[in-house]
Image (tube, grey):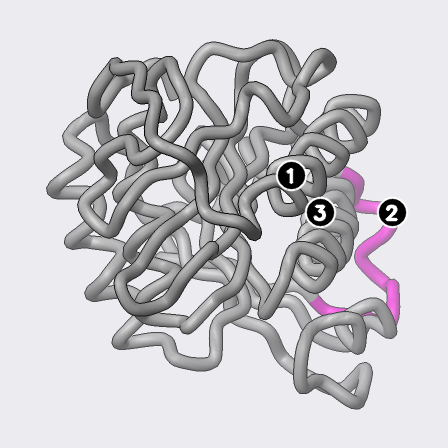
């Protein structure tokens, strides 16, 4: 989260749609902070400004999410270079770009919650965690029944963001039905067609991760009807 691609200031004008997206991302960031999902400077959020060429509005590195404002959102191109704004986007910009391209996502949101860390560590050896039988699964795009079985892949964290972006690309190609993925001992990535849908996916998956974590650590819940298994 602290790694940097580039630090710069540019006087070029942002894309006309940038302002609304920047405000939307700032609202999401403060909301997630209040829910304990992006404490301190953790987490990063992006929204697609243009598809061809690819352009993103993305959070600046090192900003306390309790104070996130539109002025902390930068505009970057498809290589992660700053087009408008000042500061430095996190090196995780490369992961946002990869997800936006391969999932045709309109927004990508990344959280650092307690339960995403607990579950990603607990199930890392299995390559992911399977969640099925919960009504909340119907909040994921395209899911219409609680009987759905969602596989949430887990990959090892790394500070080599170029290599990690390649790993994420391979994962997304291999798991076309996944609605998100976990970085071990790091956090959750998910996305949506726009900020609203991506936010809903965070809320759904964070809920389910907390369920998974609580069941893993409380044997007296083993008889629950829903199932979480590796």
As drawn, 97 above or below 36: below
Relative to the observer, which residue lies in front, 145 or 106?
106
Q: Which mark is residue 206?
A: 3
Quadrant hosting residue 61: top left
Residue lying at 82% horizontally and 71% vertically, measured from the top left = 134
- Residue 227: x, y in percent? 72, 69
Pair 2/3: label in front:
3
Instruction: Report the residue marked by disc 2.
Output: 220
Left or right of 137, for residue 74: left
Quadrant hosting residue 98: bottom left
Which quadrant of the figure contains the N terminus?
top left
Q: Secondary structure at mark 1?
A: helix
Instruction: Report the residue marked by disc 1.
Output: 25
Tell me the chief SS of the magenta region: loop
- Residue 81: x, y in percent? 22, 35
Q: Secondary structure at mark 2?
A: helix
Left or right of 31, for residue 96: left
Within-10-Å neighbours for mark 1: few <14, some 14–19, many 20+: many
Whole-Å distance between the Cαs marked 1 and 2?
39 Å
Residue lying at 57% horizontally and 29% vertically, measured from the top left = 112
User: Which stretch appears magenta?
Assistant: 218-227
Q: Does 105 lie within the magenta span?
A: no
Residue lying at 65% horizontally and 67% vertically, measured from the top left = 131
Pair 3/1: label in front:
1
């Amino acid at each position: 989260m602290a790694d940097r691609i580039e630090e710069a200031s540019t006087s070029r004008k942002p894309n006309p749609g940038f302002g609304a997206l920047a405000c939307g991302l700032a609202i999401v960031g403060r909301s997630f902070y209040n829910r304990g999902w992006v404490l301190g400077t953790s987490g990063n959020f992006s929204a697609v400004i243009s598809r061809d060429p690819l352009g993103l509005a993305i959070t600046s590195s090192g900003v306390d999410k309790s104070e996130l404002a539109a002025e902390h959102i930068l505009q970057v191109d498809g290589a992660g270079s700053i087009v408008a704004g000042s500061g430095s986007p996190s090196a995780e910009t490369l992961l946002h770009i990869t997800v936006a391209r391969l999932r045709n996502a309109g927004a990508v949101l990344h959280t650092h919650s307690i339960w995403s860390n607990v579950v990603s560590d607990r199930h890392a050896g299995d390559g992911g965690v399977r969640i099925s039988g919960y009504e909340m699964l119907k909040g994921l795009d395209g899911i219409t029944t609680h009987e759905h079985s969602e596989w949430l892949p887990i990959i090892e964290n790394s500070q080599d963001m170029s290599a990690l972006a390649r790993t994420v690309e391979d994962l997304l190609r291999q798991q076309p039905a996944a609605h998100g993925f976990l970085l071990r001992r790091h956090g959750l990535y998910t996305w949506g067609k726009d900020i609203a849908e991506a936010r809903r996916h965070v809320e759904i998956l964070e809920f389910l991760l907390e369920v998974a974590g609580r069941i893993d650590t409380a044997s007296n819940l083993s008889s629950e009807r829903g199932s979480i298994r590796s």
